[in-house]
Amino acid sequence: MSQSKPIRRVAVIGTGVIGASWTALFLAHGLEVVATDVAPGAEAALKHFVAAAWPALQRLGLASGASQSKLTFSAALASAVKDVDLVQENGPEKIDFKRTLYRELDELLHPSVIIASSSSGLTMSEIQSACELHPERCVIGHPFNPPHLIPLVEVVPGEHTCDESVQRAVEFYTALGRTPVVERKEIPGFVGNRLQNALSREAIYLVEQGVVTPEDLDKVITNSLGIRWATVGPFLGSHLGGGPGGYRHMAEHIGKSMKKMWAGLGTPSQTPEEQERLIEAVETAYGSSTYSELSEARDRKQLAVLAALEEN
């Protein structure tokens, strides 16, 4: 595998929400993209998504050569991955599907081609076990939605992934303006999703117990933790919270009370009845707006946060 070969042509397998967002990002950075998806109407839906995302990408700044015209679509996998330098795979989270796909990709692709998976739960060791030729070029490249705006990419090697593949993936995502984080150990859900699910579990519990409505819980996050964590994260936030004594002061003085609170965190029952009540409560809070209206507002606000973070 050669590190020196530049990545100019990318195949995107699966053009749902994540695959479409990756496609928009790749095009905005001047790459040629060949997308493939067997779903009916996939090509039209993808082009619509890219066109809708383009104004936001223009505000962030397009690379030289960026053009929506560099997108082509092929329903045939072999045609889509021909002569590409990297594959970003966004298929269903089903291990049998992934293994079958990776076995085929392993046979189709030149050994130098990186295969990156957007998988949010399956580990690369599970997936690459189907690759008999070159499992060393397979790596997790897990984004946060939407990838064309949110910078994080979790890069997670599998048991047979080589260091060179990890480095090439890091360099690739960095060149796209992303923030890749290499995780040292495989764990289901990786880091971002595990943190998200820990908070979501307690959020559901609090709503289930009647402590707060979904809308007001969102207000708590967006007017406190969301602002804090967008700038410093949990550990630096705690370090600063300890004053001049830092994290040591924080841990020594409130560590015991924190442990008591951990023991009291809830586990939502989420029976069918409780789940339906929660769904109806969320729909009551946000159902008067369309998906397009809500996602546009989200993206506009996220762009403002990203612009603020860029200022320092």
Image (cartoon, rainbow, N blue to C red):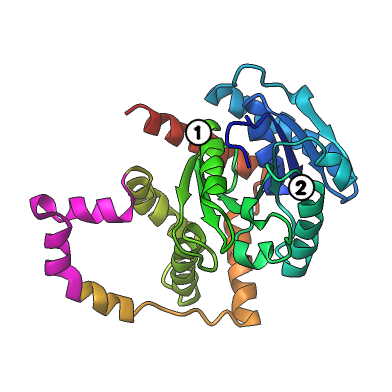
Camera-side residue: 8 or 154? Answer: 8
Q: Left or right: where does residue 71 sit relative to residue 135? A: right
- Tell whether label 2 touches label 1 (CB within 8 Å): no
Image quadrant holding the C terminus, namely top left
> Would residue 247 be counted in the magenta stretch?
yes
Marks 1 and 2, how far apart at CA:
27 Å
Q: Position of residue 263 (x, y in %)?
A: 32, 81
Which quadrant holds residue 168? top right
Query: Which percent across, then down, holds residue 230?
Result: 38, 45
Q: Position of residue 219 (x, y in %)?
A: 42, 53
Residue type marked 2: Ile
- Drawn side of residue 59 relative to residue 255, left or right: right
Q: Is residue 287 above or below residue 149?
A: below
The residue to which callout 1 is attached is: 303
Q: Disc 2 marks which residue? A: 13
168 or 251: which is nearer to us?
168
Select label 1 or label 2 by which is in front. Answer: 2
Q: What are the residue bounds of the magenta stretch?
A: 232-256
Residue drawn at x 53%, y 48% is 166
Q: Label 1 sits on what residue type?
A: Leu
